[in-house]
Image: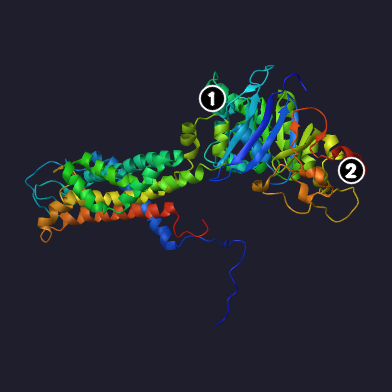
Amino acid sequence: MTSHPLLEVDGLRVAIRRQDTAPTVLDGVSFAVGASQCLGIVGESGCGKSLTLRAVMGLLPPGIERTGGRIRLSLQPGAAPSDVQADQVAGRGLAMVFQDSHASLDPTMRVGTFIAETVRRRGGTSRSDARRRAVELLASVGVPDPKLRFNAYPHELSGGMRQRVAIALALATDPRVLLCDEPTTALDVTLQAQILRLLDTARAERGLGMVFVSHDIAVIRQIADVVAVMYAGQIIEIGPVSDVLDRPRHPYARALIDAVPSLDGPVGPFRSVPGSPPAPIDYGSACRFLDRCGHRDTACEGVVNGIDGRGAGHRSACVHSGTLASGLEAT
Amino acid sequence: MTVSPPASGPDVVVKPRASRARLWTRSAAAWLLALTILAAVFAPLLAPADPGQLTLDQLQPPGADHLLGTDALGRDVLSRLLFALRTDLMLMVFAAGLPMLIGTLIGAVAAYYGGVLDAALRWVADIFQALPVYVLLIALVFVLGPGTSSLLVAFSVLGWVVYARLIRTEVRRVREQEYVSAGYLLGLSRTAVLFKHVLPNSLRQSFVYLATDMGMALQGIAVLSFFGLGVKAGTPELGAMVSEAQLYLRSHWWLAAFPGVTIVILGSSVAALGDRLSGRGEVGR
């Protein structure tokens, strides 16, 4: 990690606005991403992975709002991250790749025109230069015949090609940090690998910071350096990919990773985590995994916070992580 | 009864399609409309005489000198008809296009920004919905005085509401699409996103309605002119021509028949094409 992180999220809190209550759905999420670094975020549906990205981008759906926390972004190379408003990050420093490229590209715009206009909006580019730049971008994300595809509408492209275009579009804003919201989930496995390689190349070449949300642990293992496991709106474990995925310390992280069927492991019944996560309205100060956990005791009913993902090293929010670690590693 | 084997083979393609009659109507409508537009555009070249030229050959039946006869003032009916097409097509486009422009802008802005603006729009739209449009149209033109501009003002004042309603529904749907969020992410302002991403994806229904509305506008203009509330006296216009022909309906049929039939054909052509745009009754489109 370089001296300054590019993106720093500190104590992010997001709540659903209701008349009487305001259930908190993201509770003190903190993390940092440095240049050329990829932070993976895993967790089951509804744990707040995508919401975290949307909150960072200032794209929360109506009725859901940020109630606390700071987002700092390093806007100049080498500069320390500074506080930013949601409307400042769009198109300047942060870009996002969505899960469904069919929904995230405007069906009435030719893809090349779209990219060229995005390039031009950054200023100082003539129309023909922007056009040339758009063709270059299309070529750099592996679109064959970029000059021809320049005039294509999104529906004329295949799913993989569309996702490439969506990536080119995100790169057209020259971002410092790229947020990826399950960009490979809608693609088949061979395309998945290609898109991951493409993102990896872009990260290396541009020194991009990356936050990669996925529920696919294999994908995270392939692309991320550091992985954060989220549960019920908190980060409950974070650390270098191989540490977390091979030696999880939190019982939930372990259950999640164990639930992935393995090709070379012993054949057996699918393992799943019994029960379901609590609803945001029921989030308390105790450990939120309490009811589903096999290791619970009275200590779990005290105050258990999510962990601050900004530090280094492998850490878990579980009060028993010290004692459990050795036992969990063995299995 | 013997059961014949189902027709099959490489050359038989079973595909659902619109009925033969409907297809025929459509292509006939398209040709007729194209022909009418061409006739209107080239009216100065095609017309055998000046449409306003008075002569002493009054009330001549259709014949070699005057293909469609002459009217009570000795003016050539064919020439007047050709120039009337210009007037009516032009008025038709503006009488439907202006309300669309106004209604779409108001509706889109209200729906996109929501809040008080949107509530006000819904309120106004509900009131307009309850009003008898034709009666108001006639009253409004009467107050404003006859003439093309008051026609267009009247149509705009009364017509924008439907377009505003239509676009409102569409904009509210489209603004939730992911590519709209993506637009903000690429650094577009809210207004820019409205015009770049939201509107282009919301306009389809409005254009379908525009086609239908043009047919209604055409009839409305003809009707108002028939009552002497449309174009200025003397301007060649189909409804006005029918109106002028009233006195001679029994003795000189051609005066009312040709403009009358033209209104019917033009109106049905536009309606048939509007029907096609809406894709109504189409199988497996």
Judge from the rendering whether residue B70 lies leftward or rightward of residue A313; answer left or right. left
Secondary structure beneath dot 2 equals: helix
Residue placed at 61% from the left, 40% from the top?
A: A15
Q: Nearer the viewer, residue B103 or A94?
A: A94
Look at the numbered discs 2 and 1 and tell me whether their residues touch, using CB distance below 8 Å. no
Residue B161: x and y in percent read: 34, 46
Front of the two marks 2 and 1? 2
Residue placed at 60% from the left, 67% from the top?
A: B8
Residue A276: x and y in percent read: 73, 52
Q: Which residue is mark 1?
A: A121
Dot 1, crowdedness within 10 Å: few (<14), some or many (≥20)?
A: some
Residue A329: x and y in percent read: 90, 41
Q: Is residue B211 visible?
A: yes
Q: Which three-letter amino acid code belongs to the residue tagged 2?
A: Leu
Badge 2 or badge 1: first in the primary sequence: 1
**Residue A150 location, quadrant:** top right
Q: Nearer the viewer, residue A299 or A118?
A: A299
**Residue B157 location, quadrant:** top left
Secondary structure beneath dot 1 equals: helix
Q: How many marks?
A: 2
Locate the C terminus of chain A and report the quarter of the image it occupies.
Answer: top right
Q: Which residue is mark 2?
A: A328
Q: Residue furthest left?
A: B56
**Callouts 2 and 1 on one subunit:** yes
Q: Which three-letter amino acid code belongs to the residue tagged 1?
A: Arg
